Structure formats: C-alpha cells, structure tokens
Image: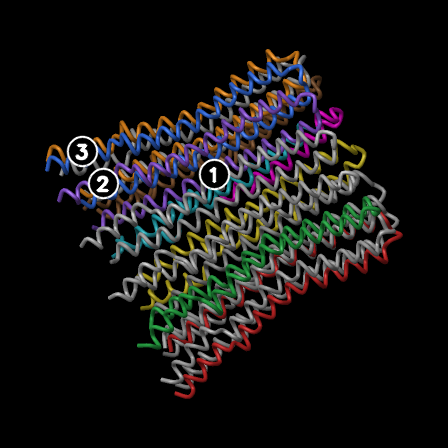
Chain colours: B red, D green, G yellow, I cyan, J purple, K brown, L blue, N orange
C-alpha cells in the first residue's frame, strides 16, 4: 500500500501549496488595483462610474488566476485521476 | 500503521503552512488598500461614501483569497478524503 | 509509539511556524495602516472621525488573517483530530 | 508498480507547482496594468475608450502566459503521454 | 526514551524560532508606526492628542501579534500537551 | 524499466518548470509595457497610433521569449528524442 | 547519555539564534524611529518635548519584542524544563 | 545503460532550465526598453523615427542573449556530442 | 567523549553566528541614525544640542541589542551550563 | 565508464547554466542602457549622433561579458580538454 | 583524535564566517554615515566642526560592532576554551 | 582513476560558474555607467569629450574585474596545476 | 592522515570565503562614499578640502573592515594554530 | 591519494568562487562611482580636475578589495601551503 500513500501525500502537499502560493500574487495584485482605484476616485470623483467598472473587470481577470489554482487544488483533492487509478487497482486486486 | 501516520503528518504540515503562507499576501494587500483609503479620505473627504464602498468591495475580494487557503486547511484537517480512505481501510481490516 | 511521536513533533513544529510566520504579514500590514492613518490625521485633522472608523474596520479585517493562523495553531495543539485518533488507537490497544 | 507511482507523483507535484507559480507573474502584471489604467482614467477621462481597449488587449496578452501554465498542468493531469505509456505497459503485461 | 527527547528538541527549537521570527514583523511595524507618528507630530503639533491616541491603539494591535507568538512559545515550553502526554506515559509505565 | 521512468519524471518536471518559470519574466515585462502604454496614452492622446503600434511590436518581442519556453516544454512532452530513444530500445528488446 | 546531549545542543543552538535573529527587527525598527525623531526635531524644534516623549514610549514598545527573545534565550539556557527533566531522570537513575 | 540515462536526464533538465531561466533577463530588459520607448514617444513625438530605430536595434541586441540560451538548449536536445558519443558506444558494443 | 565534542562544536558555531548575525541589525540601524543626525545637523544647526542628545540615547538603545548578542556569545563560550554539566560528569566518572 | 559519464554530465549542466545565468546580467544591463538612450534621445534630440555612438560602444562592452559566458559554454561542449583526455584514455585502453 | 579535529574545523569555519559576515553590516553602515556626512558638509560647510565630531563618534559606535566580531574570531582561533580543554585531555592521556 | 575525474568535474563546474557569476556584477555596473553617460550627454552635450573619456576609463576598470574571472576560468580549464599534477602521476605510474 | 586533510580543506574554504564575502560590504560602502563625495564636490566645489579629507578618513575606516577579513584569511593560510598543532602531532608521531 | 584530491578540489572550487564572488561588490561599486562621476561632470564641468582625481583615488581603493580576492585565488592555485605540504608528504613517502 506504499504507492497509494505516496500519491496521497503528494496530493495533500501540492493541494495546499498550490492554493497558498497561488493566492500570493492575486492578493497583492488586487491590493494594488484597489489601492489605485481609491487614489483615482479621490483625485477624479466625477469619473467614478468608469473607474469602478474598470476596477471590477480588472479584479475579475486577476481573481481568475487565483481560481485556476483553487481549481487545481480541488481536482487534486476530490477528482485526482492518479489516485482513482491506484484505488481501482488495489480494489480490484 | 506507517501509512496513516505519513498522511496525518503531511496533512498537519500542509494545513499549517497553507494558512500561514496564504495569509501573507492578503494581509499585505489589505494593509495597502486600507492605507490608500485613509490617504484618499484625507485628501478628498467629500467622496468618503464612494471610497468606503469601493474599499469594502475590494477588501472582500482580497479576503476571499485568504478564505480559499483557510478552507483548504480546514478540508485537510477535518474532511480529508485521503485520511478517510486510509482510516476506513485500517478499520475494515 | 513512533507514530505518536511523529505526529506530536509535526504538530509542535507547525503550530509554532504557523503562528510566527502568519503574524509577519498582518503585523507589517497593520504597521502600514496605522502609519498612514497618522499621516492622514496630521494632514486633515477635521476628518478624524471617518479616518479613525475606517482604520478600525481595516485593522479588524487584517487582524482576522492573523486570527486564522492562531486558530489553526490552537487546533493543532489542543484539538488535533489526527493526534486524537492515534491516542485512541494506542489507548484501545 | 513503483514506476507508475513515481510518474504519478511527479505529475501531481508539477501540475500544482506550474499553475501556482505560473500565476504569480501574470497576476502581478495584471494588477500593475489595471492600476495604471485606473490612474490614466482619472488623469485623462476623455481618452477612456482608447485606454480601455488597450488595457483589454494587454490583459489578454498577459493572461495568455497564465493560460500556457494552466494548459501544461491540465496536460500533465489528464493527457500525460508518459503516464499513458506506463499504464498501457502495465495493462498489457 | 528517544520519543521524549525528540518532542523536547522539537519544542525547544520551535519555541525559540516562534518568538524570534514572530518578533520581526511587529518590531518593524512598530518602528514604522512610531516613525510616522513622530513625523506627524512635527508636521501638525496641534493634533498631538489624536495622533498619540491613535498611535497607542495601533501599537496595541500590532503588539498583539507579537504576544500571540510569545504565548505559543510559552505554551510549548511550559504547558505542552504532547510533552505531558509522553511524560505521563513513561511515568505510568 | 527504471531508466524509462527516470527520463519520464525528468521530462515531466522540467516541462512544467520551464513553462511556469519562463512565464514569470514575460508576464512582468508585458505588464510593465502595457502599464507604460496606458500612461503614455493618457499623457499624449494624439500619439495613440504610434504608441499602440510600438506597444504591439514590443509585446510580440516579449511574448516570443515566453513562446521559446512553451516550445521547449512541448518538445519535452511530445517530441522528446531521449524518450523516443529509450522507448525504441525497450520495444526492440 | 545521547538524549541529554541532543537537548543541550538544541538549547544552545536555539538560544543563540533566538537572540541574534530576534534582535534584527528591533534594531532596525529603533534605528528608523530614532532617525525620524532626529528629522522631526530638526524640522520642528518647538515640539521637542512631545517628540522626545513619544520616541521613548515607542522605543520601549519596540525594545519589548527584543526582550521577549532575550528572555526565551535565558529560559532555554538557565531554566530549561526539558533539560531539568532529563537531568533529574539520569540523576535518579 | 545507466550512463545513457544519466546523460539524457541531465540534458533534459538543463535544456529546460537554460531556456526558462535565460529568458528571464531578456524579457525584463525588453519590457523596460519598450516601456521607456513608449514614455519617450509620448514626451517627444517628433523624434519617433530615431526612437523607434534605436529601440529596434536595442531589442535585437537584448534578444540575442535569449537566442544564445535557446541555441544552447537546442544543441543539448538535438545535437548533444556527449549523448552521441554514448549512443555510438552502446550501439557499437 | 563524543557528547562533549558535540556540545563544544555547537557552542563554537552558535557563539560566532550569534555575534556576527546579531551585529548586522544594530550596525545598519546605527548607520541610519548617525546619517540622519548628520542631515539634521546640516539642516538645523541651532538644534544641535537636542539632536546630539537624542542621537546618543538612541544609539545606546540600539547598541543594547548588539550587547545582548555579545553577552549570549560570551555565556556560550565562557559560562556554558551545558558544557559545565558534561565536563563535571566526565570528570566525576 | 562511470568517469566519462560524470564529466559529460558536469559539462552539460555547467554549459547550460553558464549561458543562461551569464545572460541575466548583460540582458538587464543592455535593457537599462537602451532605455536611458531612448530617454536621452527624447530629451535632447540634437545630440542623437553622440548618444547613438556612445550607446553602441557601451552595448558592445556589455555584450562582451555575455560572449565570455557563451564561449566558455561552447568550449565545455565542443572543446573540453578534460573530456578529450578521458575519451583518449578509454579509447587507448 | 577525531574530536580534536571536529573542534578545530568548527573553530576555523566560524572564525572566518564571523569576521566576514560581521563586517558586512558595519561596512555598509559606515559607508552610509560617511556619505551623509559628505552631503551635509556640502550643504552646510559652516557646521563642519559639529558634523565631523558627530561623524567620528558615530563611526566609533558602528566600528565597535565590527570589533565584537573580530574579537570573537580571535578568541576562537587563539584562546578557544573548548580547544584547550580537548588538547589538555589528549595531552594528559 | 576516480581522483582524476573529481578534479576534472570540479574544474569544469567552477570554470563555468566563475565566468557566469563573475560577469553579473561587471555587466550591471557597465550598464549603469553607460546609462549615466547617456543621461549626462543629453544634459550637457558640451562636456561630451570629458564625459566620453571618463566613461571609457571607468569601463576599463570595471571590465578588468570581469577579465579576472575569465582568466581564472581559463587557468582552470587549460593550465590547471592540480590537473597537471594528477595527470603526471597517473602517466608516470 | 584524514584529520590533517579536513583541517586543510576547512582552512582553504574559509580563507577564500572570508576574503571574497568580506570584501562585498566594504566595496559597496566605498563605492557609495566615493559617489557621494563626487556629488558633493560638484555641488560645493569650495568645500573640496574638507570633503576630500573627510572622504579619506571615512575610506580608511571602511577599508579597515576589509583588512580584518584579509588578515583572518592570511592567518588561516599561513599561521593557522590548528594546522600547526596537527602537523606537529603527525611529525612527532 | 584521496587526501591530495580533496585538497585539490577544495582549492579549485574556492579559487573560482573567491574571484567571481569577490568581483561582484567592487564591480557594482565602481559602476556607481563612475556613474556619479559622469553626473557630476555634466553638472559642474568646471570642477572636472578635482572630480577626476577623486574618482581615480576612489576607484583605486575599491579595486584594492577586488585585488585581495584575486591574490587569495592565485595563492590557492599556485602557492597553496596545504597542497605543498601534502605533495611533499606523498613524494617523501
């Protein structure tokens, strides 16, 4: 059963690291975008509609990279093809 | 029982690292967003409604990446499919 | 008893690292937020009510990420499901 | 079956790291692009059409590098030629 | 007695690292907060009451993260549940 | 079959790392180029034709380095001469 | 006597690292605070009483984090409960 | 056949790393050059001919260092003298 | 005699590292404080008494953290309780 | 034949690393030089002859360091005295 | 004689590292202090007496941390109590 | 023949690293010097003779450090005294 | 003779590292001091006597830390007490 | 003959690293000094005599630290006392 364990350990480790490391960039990028939006609003309150809209589109784009990482984590935990293969093998044995 | 232990150790290690490392980015990003909000408020007190609203939406987006990490940690500690599989195996044995 | 020890060591190590590393980001972020609040107060003393309120909401959001890490540490030390499982096993044996 | 496991572990590890590390650059770059777009909008609201269009083209270019990484991850998880080769071998054995 | 020693060593190592590493962030953050407070005082001496009060609240928030780390260290040295468990075991043996 | 596995593992690992690491530089560089383009457009809307053209040429140059990395990854996964050699050997054996 | 030695070595190593690493942050933070105090004094000599008082309170707060580290080091060298336990054991044996 | 494998693994690993790492510098440098070109065009539209020409010469120089790395990668994959020597040896054996 | 040697080696290594690493922070901090003092003196020669006094108090505070490290080093070399314990043991044996 | 392989592996690894790492500095330096040239051209179009000439001399100097690295790589791959010595030995044996 | 050698090796290694690493901070700090002194002299030549005096006091403070490191190195090379102890032992044996 | 190989491998590895790492500093330094020369030429075209002369003397000084590294690499590849000694030994044996 | 070799290797390694690493700080610090001296001379040519004198005193202080490192290297190569001790032992044996 | 080889390998490795790493600092420092000299010349062409003289003295001081490293490398390659000792031993044996 050693193989099953190794795949499980690898999946656990990588699922955690992917989410935590993959959130570093998007979080900082969103922080920067939000911060600039606030500066721009204070500087040009009249353009608040355009600024807010552009901000939300931008946040959606940035969040998408965080979503990629979260999705890969979820695949590795709940729909891992390598794990399924090994489980099927040991079950059929 | 070696396999159970290895999965437990991996889950503990990654649960901790995911939360602690995954909080680094959001914390810094929120710090930047709050700091700019304060600067903007001091610069343009009249726009305080728009600034505050945009700040809260932004903080929610950033906090969401921290939440992803916390959720993965909780899954690894309390609903870990690999751990459950191994426990079921050793129990049914 | 080797397995118990490994889980204990992993829990100790990660409990400490999670808290100490997880406090780095929030501390720096709070330092930045407080520093900007002071600058803003010196620049626009009339807006001190709004600034102080926004600062406290922001500090609460940032502190929350430190709390996540502290909670995970406490769970790992005092309510660790893997530890409990292994203790129950060795006790029932 | 050791070989199958090693290839599975390598694929899992690299699929996660590729996505999480590969999202760092694009996320930061998009954050910078969005932030500058907001500054430019606040500075020159009249040019908002050109700015928005250039921003979206730029975001698409940057997102493309994140997509490359995501695609490589997906190939490694769901269409891995090395894994297929090894599985065929062990199945035909 | 090997297990006892391993837990003791892990507790010593982590107790020290948690405090020393966990003090890095708060110290730098407090340095920044104090420095900005001094700048603000020099710039707006009339607002010294508000500035001083906000500074102290902020320092308290930041210090709290250092306290978390110190508390975890103290728990690991003087109230370590894993150590107590192992000591009880070897004593009762 | 150990050799086949080692080459497969190395190819998987390097294919992932090459793409993910190789996208870091181009992504950041494109982010910088797009950001400056937006600033320039806001500053000199009349020169938008020249700016846009120069931006696209520049983005193409930068993207080319990301393409090099992606191509090397694809070669390593789908047209790897070392893998083919080893497969031929084991097949002919 | 191997266990005693391991605990002694760990205590020595961590006592030194805790103090030396734990002094990095406070030293830099105090340097920053003192530097800003000097700038503020040169800029606003009339507020020297308030500035000096705030500086000393701030230095005390920052120094406290260095003290935490020094205290942990001293505990590990001169009042180490794990060391005492092991010494008692070997003495009573 | 161990030697063949080691050389193959080394060639794969280094071919990937050389391209991915070697593209980091040129990509950033081109990003900087393009960004400054855009700033200069916005500042002095009249000199656009000279600026564009100098930019293209500069980009060619910078791209040349990326080409060096790509060439070394291709040599290592498709025209590797060490690999050829070992293959000849094992074939002639 | 292996244990004695290990403790001696650990003490030597840590005594050196504690002093050298522990001096990094204070040296940089004092450099910053002295540098700002010189700037302030050049800017406001009339406040030279207050500036010099504050500088010396600040330098004393910063130097204290270097002293902590030096003291720990000296304790580890010349008054190391773990070394004394082991020497006594081997002497009494 | 182990020795031959080790020398081959070392040559492959270092040939790749020398080129890829050695191109980092020159690429960044050329990027900086080109960028400043563009700024200078925009600022002083009249001095474009002197600026262009100085830029090309400078780029040649910087490129020379990249050439050194490329030359060392080529020597290691195609004219490696250590490899030749070992090949002669094994051939003459 | 293995123990003697280990202590000698540790002393050599740490003596060198302590001096070389311990000189990094003071050198940079003195560079900064001297640089600011020169700026201040150019800005306020009339205050040259006060500036020079403060500079020398500051340099003495900073140099002191380099001296600490040099002293520890010299102690480890020429007056190492652990080395003396081991030499006495082997001599008396 | 193991010794010969080890010396050969060490020489290959260090020859490559010395050149590639040793070119990093000079390349960046020359990039900075050339960049400042271009800025200075744009700012003060009349002093172009003095600036160009000083630039060339400076570049020669900086290039000299890159030459040192290249020379050491060449010595290690083509005139390595340790290699010659070992070759003589094995030849004379 | 293994002990002699280990001490020789350690002395060689540390002698080189001490000089090369120990020169990093002083070189950068002197570069900064010289650079500021040149700026100051250009800004205030009348104070050139005071500036030059202060620069030379400063350079002497900074160079002293590089000398410490060089001296330790020379001691380790030509007057190493540990090496002498071991040589005497093996000679007298 | 293992000892001779180890000393040779250590000497080769350290000779290369000392030169390449030891040139990093001086190269960057000279780049900075030359760059500032060019800025100063452009700003104050009348002081070119004083500036050039100070620059050359400064470059000589900085180059001296690179010379130290080169000298240590040459000593380690061509006048290594440890190597000579071991060669004499093996020759006399």
Q: Marks 3 and 1: same chain?
A: no
User: How many angstroms separate mark 2 from mark 1 (CA)?
Assistant: 33 Å
In this rendering, the count of numbered labels is: 3
Q: Is residue G86 above or below residue I25?
A: below
Residue denoted by label 3: N87
Looking at the image, is mark 3 or mark 1 nearer the viewer?
A: 1
Residue N37, horizontal then vertical, whole percent = 59, 21
Residue at numbered disc 1: J23
Q: Chain of mark 2?
A: N
Label 3: which secondary element: helix
- x, y percent for residue B8: 46, 73
Query: Would residue I58 be counted in the magenta stretch?
Result: yes
Callout 3 environment at 10 Å: few (<14), some (14 to 19), or many (20+)? some
Q: Position of residue L58 (x, y in %)?
A: 52, 21
Q: Nearer the viewer, residue N35 or J56?
A: J56
User: For residue J15, which quarter of the picture?
Assistant: top left
Indicate which disc residue N5 carries: 2
């Amino acid at each position: 059963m050693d193989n099953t364990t190794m795949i499980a350990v690898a999946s656990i480790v990588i699922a955690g690291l992917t989410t935590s490391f993959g959130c570093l960039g998007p979080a900082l990028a969103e922080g920067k975008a939000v911060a600039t939006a606030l500066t721009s609003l204070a500087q040009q309150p009249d353009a608040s509609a355009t600024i807010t809209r552009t901000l939300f589109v931008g946040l959606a784009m940035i969040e998408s990279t965080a979503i990629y990482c979260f999705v890969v984590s979820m695949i590795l935990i709940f729909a891992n093809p390598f794990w399924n293969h090994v489980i099927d093998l040991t079950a059929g044995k």
